[in-house]
Amino acid sequence: MNISNFEFSALPKALFGPDGKMYHCNAKSKLVGILESLAKDESNTEKSSQVPNGQLESESKKAAILDGMAFLHTYFKPTHIKTCEDLCIDISKKILLKFGHYNEVHVVFDTYFSDSLKKDARENRSQGKDPVQYRISAEMKVGSISMARLLAHEKTKDEITAFLAEKILKITSEAKKKFIVSWRDKAQSSEDLADVSSLCTTQEEADTKIILHAVYLASNGLDITHIFSPDTDVMVLALRRIPRLTPQVGIFLGQGMKKFVDLIPIFNALGPLKASALPGLHALSGADITGSFINKGKLKWWKTFIDAGDDIHEALAKLGTGSSLDEEIRQRLEELVCKLYIPKTALKDVGEVRWWLFTKKQCQDENLPPTRGALDPAFLRAHLQASIWRQDLKQNPELPPALNCGWKKNGENFEPIPCVGPCVPEVAMELCRCNCGQKRCAPPCTCRAHNLKCTEMCKCEGKLDLCDNFDIEDEDDDDEERTMCSDTSDSSDDGEE
């Protein structure tokens, strides 16, 4: 049984929980604080950290991009609202009131696919409650339905965004304000003669659509862009595209989208290479369709990323290129994972890291990195997510098939592939390790009780001077194993998140 190549259980514990589902990253917003800290030395950070909506430069052309569904989730439904018509008119008026002082406003909605890979992440956020589908029409009674309940089902969200888009365009057109709304694969302006066909897209996520709209604004001569979205993903994608955005760009984040973050100082602190690598790091460390590593939060990943060399940064910047994962990129990702578990190690093979941590540090299986067989489909899922993000400026992105990127079909649903090949052989279930000290592994030694010889995995390490239950043929020690990776003080994440 080779610990380097096999897990200890039917699922890789570093990536999957006992219920068989991937661990979801529930602290993506931690990355916001990390990135903000980079810009502390920038002279304008303190001044721009709180920018009220009414104090914008009057001589500049200003635009806002609003995550429409995020706004709906913050909307408080008044008691006088009775029908869906009432609801959408009230929402449209509130959007006009809040954003009408901008020269141009873009309202962007997700597209909802029935076979979306994001289904599992959305179900995770719903906390196990079964959604109810409502058929949207002007006369539909919504007075007694909470917004959370109304927006729980994907098909309902699809219908209500289409209905709401028409109301926003009508009301803003009557107010002589320039609004552009994007929903499904459509985009339309409140100005009848405006051509916004370049914003029609088959992209699924509002995250990527927002970036498409932001670049559109820059190409049309706007000076300032304010993005309103609570999603960390949007901030990460915008930072990568800073060279193509307006001269000033910031994002309103957090609950209620009230926290302003100026993106220019952060980009300057990162530099072009790290900014380009940021989406790849974000995908690998934990996004909606990639899952995350247990006990390895964004801060731990960030420290590893900063200490890594340019070759790893370049690999992350290229992640998502092409229909398949390039082998050289895969090797650099594996090297990064090795450093995640043993900082500053020279090891580049995750199997060697597993063996070293298990034999020398007696790490439990959940504190070991995944095997190569478990890492490869995880890398492919990150590759797919990075490909989605990389094509944020394409109207009709061509994505690699999910079934080639770490996913399989179970009926109508997608499921992540835990391992390539068997995670663990039968013999691994019988693997044991003794903790004998000074008794030379006399009974009740665990290994003796199972009729097994002691090995390097045991506390005695099967050494002649400590143990009488060793295999003479295995006595020779590997001097290289004794010296490599002396720096292990931070070999496991202490739950900084």
Image (cartoon, rainbow, N blue to C red):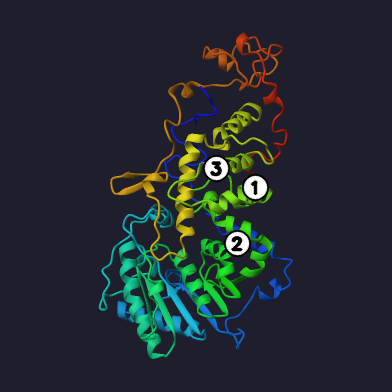
Q: Nearer the viewer, residue 120 or 35?
A: 35
Q: CA distance from mark 1 to mark 3?
A: 19 Å
Secondary structure beneath dot 2 equals helix
Say few, some or many: other residues with alpha carbon within 10 Å of mark 3 (under 14 / 14 to 19 / 20 or more): few
Residue 431 visible here: yes
Q: Nearer the viewer, residue 487 or 10?
A: 487
Q: Nearer the viewer, mark 1 or mark 2?
A: 1
The residue labelled by disc 1 is: 304
The residue labelled by disc 2 is: 32
Position of 215 compared to 56: left or right? left
Q: Position of residue 453 (x, y in %)?
A: 57, 13
> Looking at numbered disc 3 in the image, what kind of residue is underneath it?
Glu
> Looking at numbered disc 2 in the image, what kind of residue is underneath it?
Val
Say few, some or many: other residues with alpha carbon within 10 Å of mark 1 (under 14 / 14 to 19 / 20 or more): many
In the drawing, what numbered circle is on residue 328? 3
Q: Nearer the viewer, residue 88 or 340?
A: 340
Q: CA distance from mark 1 to mark 2?
A: 17 Å
Mark 1 in CB contact with mark 2 (< 8 angstroms)? no
> Looking at numbered disc 1 in the image, what kind of residue is underneath it?
Thr
